[in-house]
Amino acid sequence: MTVIKSVSVGLGDMYYIRHESDNFTIIDCMLPVNDANRCEEIVDELIEESSGKGITRFISTHPDQDHVQGIEYLDLRMPIANFYVVKNSATKNEPTDDFEHYCKLRDGSKAFYIRKGCSRRWMNQGDETRGSAGINVLWPDVNNPDFKAALTLAEMGESPNNISCIIKYVLNNGVTALWMGDLETDFMEKIDGHVDLPQVDLLFAPHHGRKSGRIPAAWLEEMNPTVIVLGEAPSDHLHYYKGWNTITQNKAGDIAFDCVTGRVDVYVSSNTYYADHLYDAGASAHHLGRYVGSFDV
């Protein structure tokens, strides 16, 4: 069994995967630093859920503040031993302490630079010690001219959205999930044809579900996602993907996906949220939250 959780953190992204194998993965960090109790609660959960796992990794999709906020606190409480990051030289005109800590991790000995098709023991290769985490990197192609241009802009202090990676997670006989950081629509249109997109069961919409990160129709048709998760951007900024099944974090709160063979059970922290595209598989009460239904994969 694998658990994928999208943590409700306000205007930002933070996820974790508690793999069925001996792996635990955190994707991005957006701790609500103005709420010390909530910060502590989230990191306590990460520590508890990763307990007993031999390998813990942190994947940084890109260094915007709403994806690195609180990373220094996280690293203090739960030391980051494996920092997966797109190689870059991004700068900020007014760098925060968290961005400085990101740079320290990015440029340090704990960094593993990810790129399209890269391999790493226990990320996507198993051995006699432990199995694979089932994670593969679909983007960036570091030789792509549009990606190189995005790197240059980030180095000049402009938005790093388009240096975001695309991460795929696959559970044997189970879910395929995809993360896209904060890729913007115009950039996705530029690199159309240069990304090998799989069929996807669970898709986390880029740029928190914003209209500026609207996934091109051709990409949606290729991935054919069963469920799209929209982040916590303001509602008037969201693209609602009419015609596709969605879960909106603004309404659902924390969203946990309990992934088993052939099915995903969905739990939320909201007491009122429901999704009529999910069916009742009779899942029992769970520490992950309130059960709201399931979907097949």
Image (tube, rainbow, N blue to C red):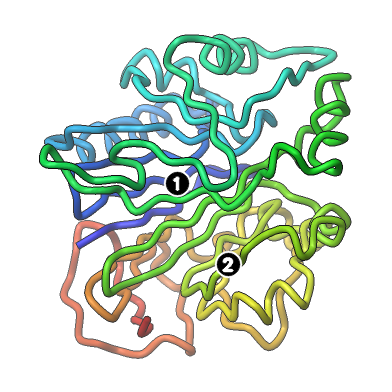
Q: Is mark 2 on a helix, strand or loop?
A: strand
**Residue situated in front as seen by the camera: 211 or 2:** 2
Name the kind of residue labelled 1 in the image.
Answer: Tyr
Q: Which residue occupies 85% across, 41% down?
A: 145
* Relative depth, front residue between 54 and 210: 54
Residue 296 at x, y percent in the picture: 36, 85
Q: Residue at x 36, y 90 (%)?
A: 279
Q: Position of residue 241 (x, y in %)?
A: 71, 77
Q: How crowded is mark 1: few (under 14 residues within 10 Å), some or many (20 or more)?
A: many
Q: In this view, does 117 lie above or below 152?
A: below
| Residue 50: assigned label | none
Q: In which quarter of the image is residue 238?
A: bottom right
Q: In which quarter of the image is the C terminus?
A: bottom left
Which residue is tagged 2? 248
Please name the residue shown 36% across and 41% down the image: 25
In depth, the one of 191 and 205 nearer the eye is: 191
Residue 237 shows up from this direction:
no
Q: What residue type is labelled 2?
A: Thr
- The residue that disc 1 covers is 15
Residue 76 seen in render: yes
Q: In this view, does 141 lie above or below 71?
A: below
